[in-house]
Amino acid sequence: MTRQFLVSALVVACLFGLMQSLQADEIKKLVLPGEAFRVEGRPAFILWPEEPLRKTPQPWVFYAPTLAGYPDEHEKWMHQQFLSAGVAVAGIDVGEGYGSPAARKLFDAFYDQMTAQRGLAKKPCLLGRSRGGLWVTSWACDHPERFAGLAGIYPVFDFRTYPGLEKAAPAYEMTAAELEQHLDKHNPIACMSVLAKAKLPALMIHGDEDVVVPLKENSATFAETYKAHGAEDAVTVIVAKGQGHNFWEGFFRCQELVDFTIARAKAGAETP
């Protein structure tokens, strides 16, 4: 009887674990072991370092865009470096928000849950890939005190370049013409002075032949804004010669970006 009970309990435990795994997969598929859940009804995730590497508070990377399929296989090595260094990775799918107020509210809810309920540090390092740059910088401008660094892989900072006013406007509940009249308020590139004045560390890698997200109007303009405010020492732009907006391995195996992100995430965890 006891043996039958133990076997039954083991089967139930295995089935429960399998059900949890399947439920997580239904919410979001992950490139590395972690957990998927919902915040305000939106898919979210955390990739955790192995137990011996975890800390309290937990250093982490706030990643964007957490759309379906992201983070992807191209980024797997990079995220594994973070985890191996004891840095978690987390993000929330806000849809094609392009840095809109509605998207930023979801970022607020996610940040609050991560820091208040899940033990993550109050100052993550932000990491935006492509349009994820709009996500993280718009939120960063609202809360420069909430992050320790900003990293980017061919990041978008000016939504006029991508996705363009016509596609970005619906996320802001405006017409393209209305959004154009409020660029100073809503376009992330217009608020970079907030980050520059605070001399918040930033590093990005961007191809000089990127026609989807042009270097000049995005990462280069970001760096110029820092320079204009005397914060040129706080920003680094790595120019990938001959590269466009693609899956070149160098974007996702950039050791300088990895080291920067880890260092800033750990620094953020040490800051009250």
Image (spheres, rainbow, N blue to C red):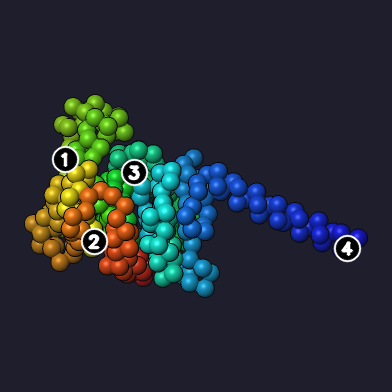
| Label 4 residue SS | helix
Q: Which residue is mark 4?
A: 2
Nearer to us of marks 4 and 1 is: 4
Residue identified by numbered label 3: 104
User: Horizontally, is 180 left or right of 21 in the view?
Assistant: left
The residue that appears at 50% across and 46% down in the rendered structure is 28
Residues marked 4 and 1 touching at CB (< 8 Å): no
What amino acid is at disc 2?
Answer: Leu
Left or right: residue 108 versus residue 214 is: right
Q: Position of residue 29 (x, y in %)?
A: 50, 48
Q: Which residue shows up at 35% across the image and 67% down it?
A: 262
Q: Looking at the image, is mark 4 or mark 1 earlier in the sequence?
A: 4
Q: Is residue 198 visible from the viewing direction of this image?
A: no
Residue situated furthest right in the rendering: 1
Q: Which residue is mark 1?
A: 184
Q: Secondary structure at mark 2?
A: strand
- Can you tell which mark lies on residue 203? 2
Distance from disc 1 to disc 2, alpha carbons, whole Å, reads 24 Å
Instruction: Please state which amino acid type lies under the numbered disc 3.
Output: Arg
Disc 3/disc 4 C-alpha distance (Å): 54 Å
